[in-house]
Amino acid sequence: MPFLLRVELPDVPGSLGRLASAIGAAGGDIEMIEIVEKHHETSTAVDDVLLDIHDGTMPDSVVSACNALDGVKVLWISRYAAGGNLFLDLEAVEELTAEPSAALDRIVEVLPATFRADWAVRVHRSRGTGHRTDGAPEDLPFIELDAASQFEVDGDDVNLYAGARIDGNEIIVIGRRGGPAFVASELARLGHLVSLAASLARP
């Protein structure tokens, strides 16, 4: 069964090897690892690990094995419905450039896989929600955003929101149910991809 594990670990040689050994001993197989963020001031890194957990193995066993390693902290684990490979930014760019006129709708469709989010939606200042993926809220308020950022929506204690500006009247929002929180590097990537989509879509 595929799971996505987000883990913070020391950014030193051998850390990934020790992590992989612990996951294997606990009954998991690593399919792919992607670096999410590096913190040079603390010499730590945040990685997303796509793994397959053997039948009969509890995810808690993998979490405990990882947390038992010196300097390692599991930030999040959940089932990863998409399975397979992680959707990299370059693949998202290829999708956008294939049909530039449809880039703003296409970016909404590829962002959930790119960021391991649950949904994405375009929100216009006056028209409200527009193109969206399954699971996205039907009624989401327009938020003034100068830069890609995480924000909260009153009355929603389930979703974590992050958005980026298309222009002064429209934004794109992605959401995760429960977590993990969006880190600074993810917000920067979101801003760049939405800006690219907006540039491609301009006549």
Image (cartoon, grey):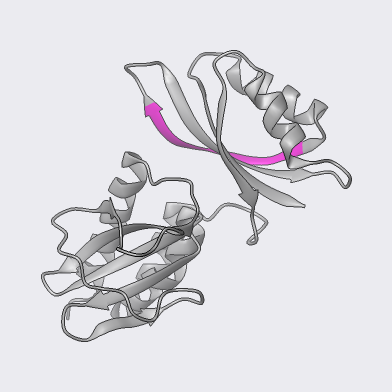
Was residue 30 drawn as part of the magenta stretch in this picture? yes
The quarter of the picture where residue 139 lies is: bottom left
Q: Which residues are magenta?
A: 29-38
- The answer to whether residue 193 is above or below residue 77 is below
Near-viewer residue (155 or 78) = 155
On the image, the x and y values in percent for residue 153 come to 30, 62
On screen, residue 126 versus residue 136, left or right, reads: left
On screen, residue 162 versus residue 111, left or right, reads: left
Q: Tell me the residue at 78%/44% (across/down).
A: 53
Query: Is most of the magenta stretch helix, strand or loop?
Result: strand
Q: Residue furthest right?
A: 56
On the image, the x and y values in percent for residue 111 come to 43, 63
Q: Residue furthest front?
A: 155
On the image, the x and y values in percent for residue 203 come to 17, 81
Near-viewer residue (84 or 62) = 62
On screen, residue 78 versus residue 152, left or right, reads: right
Near-viewer residue (193 or 129) = 129
- The answer to whether residue 137 is above or below residue 149 is below
The quarter of the picture where residue 165 lies is: bottom left
- The answer to whether residue 142 is above or below residue 92 is below
Q: Tell me the residue at 36%/78% (across/down).
A: 105
Q: Tell me the residue at 44%/74% (across/down).
A: 136
The answer to whether residue 20 shows anywhere in this view is: no
